[in-house]
Image (cartoon, rainbow, N blue to C red):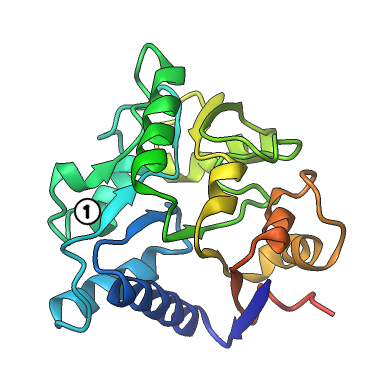
Amino acid sequence: MQTRILATPTELADAVAVLIADCVRAKPAAVLCLAGGDTPRAAYARLVEMHRAGEVDLSQVTYVGLDEWVGLPADYPGSCRAFMQETVFGPLAVPPERIVFYDAMADDLQAECRQIDDFLAAHGPLDLVLLGMGMNGHLGMNEPGCIVDSGSIVTELDAVTVSVGQKYFGAQQPVLKQGITLGIGSIMQAHCAVLMVSGEKKAETVCKALQLEVGNAVPASLLRQHRHAIAMLDAAAASRLI
């Protein structure tokens, strides 16, 4: 696993945007999976700028959803789908046929898992997956103790994820119990897996993920077994590395 350390969050965002753009330049009809959350927001803004400036053409890209909070509709403020609509799909005017996302309101969540897995079987694997990392080391909603070789799964959310996740919802505080997510097996099949982490508050978890034992106790550590994984960190997130 490669590790790149950028001095500031802005430099980190720019570097991640360039990495995604390079992937699309190499394969214009790339299949991408991009994480939600605060960390990649600036990278997506930079990527949109690059597209509008003609530095990269994102018009043929297909986007696969990484995860979603079970029980939230796609347009619910703070949902993963709503975040992607705000930061990527809307600004790029991505047509619906190029978006493959979980319906977390579906009566049959296992069918939703199969839908994503069937899509990847036919059109994948992912060319690039951009991942954040939770305070507990989760990837997507693959929580500590997760299955290490699964496709899409419905998960019981860790207490840390539930607590931290409430920040996305402001005054609205939905009950968060389960997630639906791309599994570790699908992530490991991606041609390129990028782990993006910013901030000193995650420095200890970064150290566990990159330098201590590999295993599902810290799901992000599993990326060290990926054939082409890159950890993209700002200096604060990397501050505990030896």
Query: How busy is the neighbourhood of tag 1: few (under 14 within 10 Å), some, or many (20 plus)?
Result: some
Locate residue 184, reporting x and y percent.
61, 44
The three-letter code of the residue at mark 1 reads Phe
Task: Name the residue located 44 percent from the left edge and 75 percent from the top edge.
Answer: 16
Locate residue 19, reporting x and y percent.
42, 77
Q: Is residue 188 visible?
A: yes
Locate residue 174, reporting x and y percent.
44, 26
On the image, which quarter does residue 163 sit in? top right
Locate residue 108, reporting x and y percent.
40, 13
Q: Is residue 218 above or below residue 146?
A: below
Q: Secondary structure at mark 1?
A: helix
User: Could you tell whether 145 is left or right of 183 in the image?
Assistant: right
Task: Name the residue located 79 percent from the left edge and 75 percent from the top edge.
Answer: 240
User: Could you tell whether 177 is left or right of 66 in the image?
Assistant: right
Residue furthest to the bottom: 7
On the image, which quarter does residue 111 sit in? top left
Q: Is residue 78 visible?
A: no
In terms of depth relative to the viewer, which is nearer, 242 or 116? Answer: 116
Task: Name the residue located 25 percent from the left edge and 62 percent from the top edge.
Answer: 29
User: Split into 4 quadrants, where in the image is the N terminus?
Assistant: bottom right
Task: Name the residue located 67 percent from the left edge and 52 percent from the top edge.
Answer: 135
Label 1: which residue?
89
Residue furthest to the front: 122
On the image, which quarter does residue 27 sit in? bottom left
Q: Is residue 72 above or below residue 85?
A: above
In terms of depth relative to the viewer, which is nearer, 59 or 203? Answer: 59
In terms of depth relative to the viewer, which is nearer, 125 or 93? Answer: 125
In terms of depth relative to the viewer, which is nearer, 212 or 36? Answer: 212
